[in-house]
Image: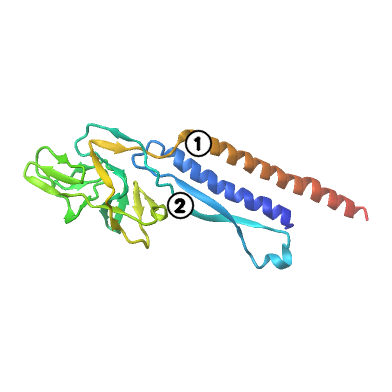
Amino acid sequence: MPGGHYIALSGMRTRLDQLDRLATDLANSETTGYKGERIATAEEQRSEFSDELTSAIDVSLAGRRLDTTAGTIEPTGMELDMAIDGEGYFEVSTPNGPRYTRNGHFGRSASGQLVTGEGLPVMGENGPIQLQPGPVSVGSDGTINSTGGPAGRLKVMRFDEPGRLVREGRGLLNATDMTPLAANSYAVRPQSLEGSNVSVVMHVAELANVTRAFEALQKSVAVFMNDIDGKAIESFGRR
């Protein structure tokens, strides 16, 4: 395959990855605590090109990073809804280990534990938070009080490179090989939730740009194959 063909096809492949990312972000524009992603592209060095594709450039994804920009905090009036104003993430216990989230839409399990919408325990500084029957109040420092007194303080963690957190679905983030640190610069807003940080207007504009770029590359492939290659074959066929 000539180098020009490969450059165009390589560019089309990265645009498809970008379209997938934009579609996911737009589908979650109303998801509580959702964080969009940013991706970059880079030239991929392939030694095998030196012999067969001397003019080819392979473009690939240079990595994904979470967009940790805060979403808008809106009051809900729900007793166990909470939002983090500032840095940090709620820690949640899962069968696969601790995970982190900005989705503070919590509830009370049958046993009285503070849990996520999927029933996963929300962690406090001394373990899962056990609520007593009756009204619950939440302080700005994350301390939760119920009828029987303090139930615990929310475990809010931060990361030196939060953009490296990996989405796992259900609003959960995996810290992979990063070490969580206790967050300091935050306030917990009771009876409130943080919205998605996805800007629909900006994403639709980006979607249009990516789509146009993909169509232009698609057209260039057609030109290479139908016009240039076709004329070359026709010319050589006459000799």
Q: Is residue 82 left or right of residue 18?
A: left
Q: Is residue 105 left or right of residue 234?
A: left
Q: Residue furthest front?
A: 185
Name the spot of residue 116 as percent of width and height, x first. Answer: 25, 45
Marks 2 and 1 in Cβ contact (< 8 Å) = no
35 versus 2 height, above or below: above
- At a point 35% along the width and 52% down the height, the residue shown is 173
195 versus 119 height, above or below: above
- At a point 12% along the width and 48% down the height, the residue shown is 151
Q: Nearer the viewer, residue 71 or 123?
A: 71
Q: How crowded is mark 1: few (under 14 residues within 10 Å), some or many (20 or more)?
A: few
Q: Quadrant of the N terminus?
A: bottom right
Which residue carries the number 1 mark? 202
Which residue carries the number 2 mark? 65
Name the spot of residue 42 as percent of width and height, x first. Answer: 58, 56
Q: Which amino acid does label 2 sit on?
A: Arg
Name the spot of residue 103 as percent of width and height, x first. Answer: 30, 43
Scheme by which the image is coloured: rainbow
- At a point 51% along the width and 50% down the height, the residue shown is 39
Q: How far apart are marks 2 and 1 (CA)?
A: 18 Å
Give whichever of discs 2 and 1 has the lower sequence position: 2
